[in-house]
Image (cartoon, coloured by chain):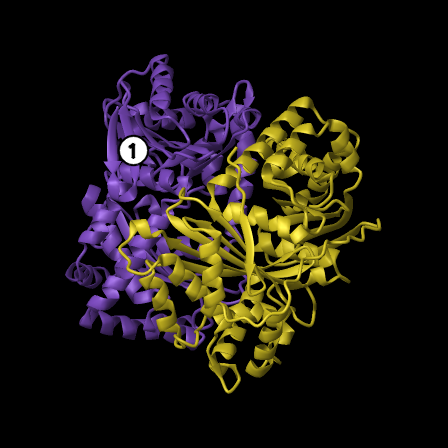
């Protein structure tokens, strides 16, 4: 396995992680900005990158702002806002062609970091606030995005299930914020919130490509206009998993297919020593075509096209999802519950263990072939304060025994059953 | 074995035609952990009426190519996914209009996984019972897509444009059409389209080309194939004009979805001429509707489009059409402004400077695409089946002229050829 060791440093209270390599045709760059997920800041934080992408001091008009990227051979630029554990993360991502493939006088990396630095730290302002018209349009954009969640029923059901699971926890919040808050956000208020965010967020900049730590550090020093006094660390998630009665939620919408989603809680998170065993548990249960859910719900009973599980080690939750005929609700739920029970009672074959280990091994080994995958894996380390390189996790996975998996199975507690169903014929 | 060197891209491609006609391509990626392999047949959802030289003419049920893809994974000794899992490979397959692709991705046991891939696709096993069972699963897959407004608005557009060409038929068919599929019809399709001379194996990643060829040679020479004549695909004469101007579907959505496009009048291009037209059209569409254009910004600022607004062009020797649009609160207003602005642009033509900048962006996007082994394998096969070469694209981009793009703009944007598809809430 290729050892992927990021070189680390910092500049302007931004942690910098650089992986020098010439294996790719591009420079891959990510800036992660994370703050604790909180009702008071979730909406302004979500709205901020939307406004930042409209224009900078040097290129205030959106069209010229975007043309810069085209001059950089159509450099990829985008951002995402999501939840990881108890944090709301804004990730800016850039992907620029390496100089050796194009004819450019200036260094492509320099231009790219310069662009990113301007976007994040030198937005266009008017009278000490964001440009009013940009804030107005982007509020509308975020509002529409929040409203459009319902269009994709698979995603809608997944998010509704989480919302029901975390009714009294900030984790119920959508990473794009709260629709009702948008209205009251003025460009002045947003600008103040942005400045606080920039001061307080944990900032991590990653670069993978044909460069060095020293070069990146120097570029960040000159291209990011920051006035920070600390480099905050992420705090580990502390999970309250007091077992409680399983809640069942049914929601009616105009749909052809029913969506059955289950949410489970676990105290086992990314930093836990049992994390590898939890990966095996999730894999055997439902993340592959050889897993129990796929075999029993789909292949044996033809009840569904998809039936799978997903483990989120940052928050300590597992979700199960399947799309079924509405009248098959009870049958499908019984089969899914039977799989959870069979895991707890130790019905785990040697073959299931070896197949699942082989699949996890493959996905860990594949990380090294993608710059953004390497960045994502390494960022887990930052986020959870757990330094565990992929090769170490791989060794831990190899050592997991069926007994370990059974022990872990007892730590996953069914919490919520959510069913999205169509209008019943009367 | 022949070697094709692409110096500008720093890639070397190895090729050999097996005695039975199978095309094999290997693209070694030194330093990559992963190997990605696709085994593809030039057979998709549109091949529903055909004749193999020396045999009878056949018409088959809608959705059968996709159904066949599902059924290939079943072998007398069990499910192929389990075998791949034991060998640490992640396997999958997909069916499009004109091809069916089986694939795996793995970091270990590459020879065993390659053999598994080739052998399972070359060993059909259909029984009355396993065919019946699959109808429930695919029925749920169809149900899932019926609830997906993006899929519905896209197919609505193709249905509006095409009356007779099978491109307008949903790839998975309908619950009614798949009900008529039997193991006999599956074998007929299999025997017609899965002959090695209609197939292509592409292997990309950390492999040695000669080792791959040696394995494939041995594997193929152990199997008996009698030469097969040419496959004639029979299409009814599709009228030049669009089938319907407007198609509207009712589905609950947060905002209406509006997709429009132009149906090409001239068809019949193949090979490099087809690719050239494809690239020229995409460039023209980007110059009209790309996110850095004045039109895009105007529509965005008027709140008539959102980030979901996009454009694409799809072509084949037998059809060609664009699809442009996204979510909008007012489809009529959107189309009105677009019509006015695009008419003005068609009259004046594009500017040299905008053309150059957009060309640069397209070249960058193409080079970035080559970072992904998955994309290389898919795109290479798609182009090869149409008689072209993925790796010639850089040279084609460099040779395009503004006059050519302007001419193509005027040819493609023909308002008589416009069709509109809407999804609106009931």
Say which residue label 1 marks. B13
Q: Nearer the viewer, residue A234 or A164?
A: A234
Q: Is residue A366 left or right of residue B45?
A: right
Q: Is residue A385 left or right of residue B71?
A: right
Q: Nearer the viewer, residue A367 or A17?
A: A17
State the residue at coordinates (77%, 32%): A406
Q: How many marks?
A: 1
Q: Is residue A405 visible?
A: yes
Q: Is residue A163 left or right of residue B252?
A: right
Query: Where, by quadrant of the figure, is residue A351 drawn?
Result: top right
State the residue at coordinates (37%, 76%): B298
Q: Which chain is depicted yellow? A: A
- Output the chain of dot 1: B
Q: Position of residue A394 (x, y in %)?
A: 62, 34
Determine whether B73 is above or below B337 in the image.
Answer: above
Extreme residue toward the left, this view: B403
Determine whether B184 is above or below A182 in the image.
Answer: above
Determine whether B376 is above or below B291 in the image.
Answer: above
Q: Position of residue A7 (x, y in %)?
A: 53, 48
Instruction: Give the structural element (helix, strand or loop) at label 1.
Output: strand
Query: Where, by quadrant of the figure, is residue B306 drawn?
Result: bottom left
Q: Residues within 10 Å of mark 1 (few under 14, many from 20)?
A: some
Q: Is residue A178 visible?
A: no
Q: Which chain is depicted purple? A: B
Q: Nearer the viewer, residue A4 or A184?
A: A4
Q: Position of residue B386 (x, y in %)?
A: 26, 40
Extreme residue toward the bottom, this view: A127
Q: Position of residue A179 (x, y in %)?
A: 62, 71
State the residue at coordinates (68%, 57%): A234
Q: Is residue B48 left or right of residue B144?
A: left
The C terminus of chain A - image quarter: bottom right
State the residue at coordinates (23%, 52%): B397
């Amino acid at each position: 396995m290729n050892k992927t060791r990021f070189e680390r440093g910092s500049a302007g209270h931004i942690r910098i992680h650089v992986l020098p390599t010439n294996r790719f045709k591009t420079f891959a760059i990510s800036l992660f900005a994370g703050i604790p997920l909180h009702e008071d800041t979730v909406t302004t934080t979500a709205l901020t990158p939307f406004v930042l992408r409209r224009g900078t001091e040097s290129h205030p008009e959106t069209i010229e702002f975007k043309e810069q990227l085209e001059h950089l051979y159509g450099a990829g630029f985008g951002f995402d806002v999501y939840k990881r554990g108890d944090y709301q993360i804004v990730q800016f991502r850039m992907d620029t062609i390496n100089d050796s493939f194009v004819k450019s006088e200036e260094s492509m990396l320099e231009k790219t970091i310069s662009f990113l630095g301007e976007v994040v730290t030198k937005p266009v302002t008017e009278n000490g606030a964001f440009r009013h018209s940009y804030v107005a349009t982007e509020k509308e954009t975020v509002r529409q995005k929040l409203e459009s969640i319902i269009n994709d029923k698979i995603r809608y059901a997944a998010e509704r299930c989480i919302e029901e699971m975390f009714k009294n926890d900030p984790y119920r919040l959508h990473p794009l914020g709260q629709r009702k808050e948008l209205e009251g956000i003025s460009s002045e208020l947003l600008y103040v919130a942005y400045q606080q965010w920039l001061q307080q967020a944990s900032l991590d900049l990653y670069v993978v490509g044909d460069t060095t730590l020293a070069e990146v550090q120097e570029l960040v020093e000159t291209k990011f206009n920051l006035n920070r006094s600390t480099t905050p660390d992420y705090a580990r998630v502390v999970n309250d998993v007091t077992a409680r009665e399983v809640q069942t939620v049914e929601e009616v919408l105009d749909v052809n297919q029913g969506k059955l989603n289950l949410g489970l809680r676990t105290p086992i998170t990314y930093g836990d020593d049992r994390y590898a065993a939890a990966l095996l548990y999730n894999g055997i249960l439902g993340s592959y075509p050889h897993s129990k859910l796929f075999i029993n719900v789909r292949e044996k009973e033809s009840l569904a096209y998809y039936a799978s599980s997903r483990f989120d080690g940052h928050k300590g939750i597992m979700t199960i999802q399947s799309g079924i005929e509405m009248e098959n609700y009870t049958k499908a739920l019984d089969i899914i519950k039977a799989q959870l029970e069979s895991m707890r009672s130790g019905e785990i074959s040697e073959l299931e263990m070896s197949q699942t280990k082989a699949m996890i091994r493959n996905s860990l080994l594949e990380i090294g072939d993608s710059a953004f995958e390497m960045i994502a894996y390494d960022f887990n380390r930052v986020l959870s304060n757990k330094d565990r390189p992929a090769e170490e996790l791989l060794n831990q996975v190899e050592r997991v025994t069926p007994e370990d998996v059974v022990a872990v199975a007892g730590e996953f507690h069914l919490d919520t059953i959510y069913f999205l169903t169509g209008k019943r014929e009367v | 074995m022949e070697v094709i060197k692409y110096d500008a891209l720093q890639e070397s491609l190895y090729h050999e035609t097996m005695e039975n006609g199978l095309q094999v391509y290997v693209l070694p990626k030194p330093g990559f952990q992963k190997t990605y392999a696709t085994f593809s047949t030039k057979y998709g959802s549109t091949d529903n009426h055909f004749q193999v030289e020396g045999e009878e003419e056949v018409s088959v049920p809608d959705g059968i190519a996709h159904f066949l893809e599902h059924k290939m994974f079943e072998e007398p000794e069990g499910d192929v996914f389990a075998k791949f899992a034991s060998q640490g490979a992640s396997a999958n397959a997909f069916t499009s209009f004109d091809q069916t692709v089986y694939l795996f991705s793995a970091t270990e046991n590459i020879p065993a996984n390659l053999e598994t891939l080739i052998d399972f696709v070359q060993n059909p096993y259909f029984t009355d019972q396993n065919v019946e069972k699959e109808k429930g699963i695919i029925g749920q897959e169809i149900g899932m897509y019926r609830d997906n407004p993006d899929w519905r608005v896209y197919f609505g557009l193709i249905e509006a444009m095409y009356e007779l060409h099978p491109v307008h038929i949903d790839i998975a068919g309908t619950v009614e059409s798949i009900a008529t599929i039997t193991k006999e019809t599956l074998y007929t399709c299999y025997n017609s389209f899965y002959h090695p001379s209609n197939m292509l194996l592409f292997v990309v990643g950390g492999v040695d080309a000669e080792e791959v060829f040696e394995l494939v040679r041995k594997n193929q020479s152990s199997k008996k194939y009698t030469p097969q004549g040419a496959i004639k695909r029979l299409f009814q004469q599709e009228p030049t004009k669009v089938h319907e101007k407007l198609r509207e579907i009712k589905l609950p959505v947060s905002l209406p979805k509006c997709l429009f496009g132009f149906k090409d009048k001239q068809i019949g291009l193949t090979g490099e001429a087809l690719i050239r037209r494809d690239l020229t059209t995409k460039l023209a569409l980007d110059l009209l509707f790309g996110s850095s254009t004045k039109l895009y910004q105007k529509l965005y600022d008027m709140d008539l489009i959102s980030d979901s607004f996009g454009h694409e062009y799809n072509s084949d020797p037998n059809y060609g059409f664009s699809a442009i649009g996204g979510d909008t609160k007012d489809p009529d207003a959107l189309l009105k402004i677009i019509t006015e602005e695009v008419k003005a642009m068609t009259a004046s033509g594009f500017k040299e400077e905008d053309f150059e900048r957009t060309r640069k962006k397209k070249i960058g996007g193409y080079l970035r695409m080559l970072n992904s082994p998955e994309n290389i394998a898919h795109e290479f096969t798609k182009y090869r089946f149409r008689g072209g070469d993925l790796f010639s694209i850089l040279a084609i981009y460099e040779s395009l002229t503004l006059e050519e793009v302007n001419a193509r703009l005027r040819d493609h944007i023909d308002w008589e050829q416009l069709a509109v598809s809407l999804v609106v809430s009931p």
